[in-house]
Image: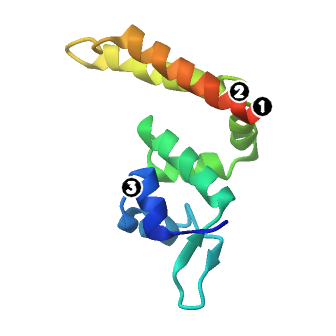
């Protein structure tokens, strides 16, 4: 099933303009268009968007995300569900303690919730 750009933007919590920008830079190109030229996003597009948003949340630049997503090794790491991305995310959160004047509030709780969430997501992928 294909989804129009507005529906994808609402569901993902991004703007339509952001999705247009991702297309302009080649980061997320919709897999189809209507006869009228409207963008349509398929399941593979939505999965790529999920990866983009994950890396953005970790603070990666769009250029870095493009390089990661186009690297077969990085994609295999993400698809394998072996926890490496979880490790990267945990390290990223922990690194804030080094640069912030105040420690990350409830860091342990945040990391636990983050771990629980991604382990559940990875379990769904693995099954």
Q: Position of residue 50 (x, y in %)?
A: 55, 47
Q: Position of residue 22 (x, y in %)?
A: 48, 63
Q: Nearer the viewer, residue 22 or 125?
A: 125
Q: Nearer the viewer, residue 71 or 84?
A: 84
In this orientation, does residue 86 appear?
yes
Residue where numbered disc 3 is placed: 14
Mark 2 vs 3, N-terminal side: 3
Tell me the quarter of the image containing the C terminus: top right
Q: Is residue 43 left or right of residue 86?
A: right
For this orientation, the residue located farthest to the top is 108
Please tell me how crowded label 2 is: few (under 14), some (14-19), or many (20+) other residues with Cα within 10 Å: few
Residue where numbered disc 2 is placed: 123
- The chosen color scheme is rainbow
Secondary structure beneath label 2: helix
Q: Nearer the viewer, mark 2 or mark 3?
A: 2
Secondary structure beneath label 1: helix
Residue where numbered disc 1 is placed: 126
Residue 30 is drawn in which quadrant? bottom right
Eyeballing the image, is 3 above or below 63? Answer: below
Q: Position of residue 17 (x, y in %)?
A: 36, 68
């Amino acid at each position: 099933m294909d989804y129009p750009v507005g529906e994808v933007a609402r569901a993902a919590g991004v703007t339509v303009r952001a999705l247009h920008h991702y297309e302009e830079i080649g980061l997320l190109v919709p897999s189809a268009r209507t006869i009228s030229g409207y963008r349509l996003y398929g399941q593979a597009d939505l999965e790529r968007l999920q990866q983009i948003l994950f890396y953005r949340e970790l603070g990666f630049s769009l250029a870095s995300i493009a390089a990661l997503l186009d690297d077969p090794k990085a994609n295999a790491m993400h698809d394998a569900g072996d926890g490496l991305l979880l490790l990267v995310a945990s390290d990223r959160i922990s690194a804030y303690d080094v640069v912030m004047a105040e420690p990350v509030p409830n860091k342990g709780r945040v990391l636990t919730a983050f771990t629980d969430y991604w382990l559940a997501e990875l379990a769904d992928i693995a099954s």
